Amino acid sequence: MAGIESASKQRKRVVVICGGIAGSLAAKLLQFDADVTLIDPKEYFEITWASLRSMVEPSFAERTVINHKNYFKKGHVVTSPSVNITETDVMTADGDVISNSNIVIGYDYLVIATGHSDLFPKTRQEKLSQYQSEYENIRSSKSVLIVGGGPSGVELAAEIAVDFPEKKVTLVGPRLLEFIGEKAADKAFDWLKSKKVEVILNQSVDLNSASDGNKTYKTSGAWMVKGEMVDEHLRIKDRKNVFTIGDITSILEIKQGYVAEMHANVAVKNIKVMMSGGEKKKKMSTYKPGSEMAIVSLGRKDSVAQFPFVTVIGCLPGLIKSKDLFVGKTRKTRGLNPKCVQG
Ligand SMILES: Cc1cc2nc3c(=O)[nH]c(=O)nc-3n(C[C@H](O)[C@H](O)[C@H](O)COP(=O)(O)OP(=O)(O)OC[C@H]3O[C@@H](n4cnc5c(N)ncnc54)[C@H](O)[C@@H]3O)c2cc1C
């Protein structure tokens, strides 16, 4: 890490913990203004909301699983979980390829974006292979049991029902789409029924009882997490140089990727103001939760969408999300070709 330490003498050092939706955008937007280090346990960024399509069409993941180095060319990537944060440094579990030891990275500004933590493969290639084997599993099963009626469960059930109409799909959970209104849940229920998905609500499942030929998926409940307290500039209370963005914040709002990107934009503007010494003269940006909307895709054409005053289902709201799942748009915000693989 000697290179990182010496290069950072002239420029301010920004460390971004996690290359998910929020962290990847913050790192990308800051890379030319500071000496930026991105710490992530995996070598790639994934467009999370496209992951369920990749389970029924593995080649879709070619555009949605993107090596950090493709959009973050100027910065440093440390592939490791971060294990400790002090007032001046971040310590990683591993990541120094040469000495294979913990590394300690100093910062002037810190951005914490540890949204959703799960067990992910480390490399892009491993992730693509994982989708291929998920697909083979689904293709070779007679029936699929999905446990969890949150957005992931509903989107996965819909993807399978549309692409494999001959398979028996069963979705079990306490209720559907708990994170949005009942109207959206009822409409999604009717849509799933129309595609012959068996929806069993108010039930739990013994995951050990799944028999051969019946592939079971346990999906996360909702996009709600309990998080870090932040001020209106998205800084942790009493820590003026530490920002928290994305699902991990305590802001009362539906945890969504487009919101995480809005957080990233606000934090980046504020870091730039602070780095230029303009905090007193220039106004820092503030974040206020806006009116909420949520779109849950239902296969390749339809979706159920909750807007502030209306909930709609079908191919019209489907036009907004379901075909490309915002993949081209998200690639563009990272400076990548929306259509081209690895571009
Ligand atoms: C199926 C599904 C569909 C969705 N559809 C939509 C949609 O249509 N529109 C929308 O706006 N939102 C959608 N969302 C929600 C959206 O994906 C999340 O709100 C968004 O990913 C949150 O971004 P984030 O950066 O906070 O966290 P994440 O994107 O979850 O990123 C967290 C990152 O933290 C890393 N990490 C974890 N622990 C550590 C550690 N100790 N050290 C270093 N790194 C760590 C992980 O590797 C990961 O890269 C959907 C989510 C799902 C699951």
Image (cartoon, grey):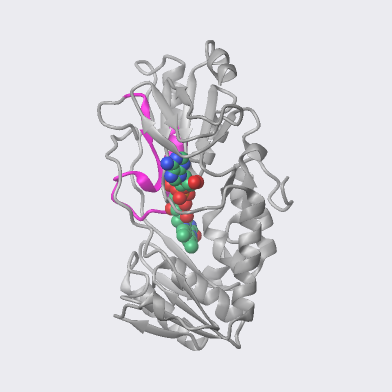
* Coordinates of residue 62 in the picture (x, y in percent): 68, 56
Which one is nearer the viewer's eye here, 112 or 3? Answer: 3
Q: Is residue 248 magenta?
A: yes
Q: With 64 as the anchor, is 20 left or right in this view? A: left
Q: Residue furthest top?
A: 10
- Numbered label tally: 0
Q: Is residue 270 visible?
A: no
- The quadrant holding residue 319 is bottom right
Q: Residue at x 59, y 68 (%)?
A: 134
Query: Relative to residue 252, is residue 222 depicted above or below?
Result: below
Q: Which residues are magenta?
A: 240-267
Q: Residue at x 38, y 48 (%)?
A: 247
* Coordinates of residue 58 in the picture (x, y in percent): 66, 65
Query: Relative to residue 295, is residue 8 depicted above or below?
Result: above
Query: Relative to residue 211, is residue 220 depicted above or below?
Result: above
Which one is nearer the viewer's eye here, 217 or 174? Answer: 217
- The quadrant holding residue 237 is top left
* Coordinates of residue 40 in the picture (x, y in percent): 51, 40
Q: Is residue 317 magenta?
A: no
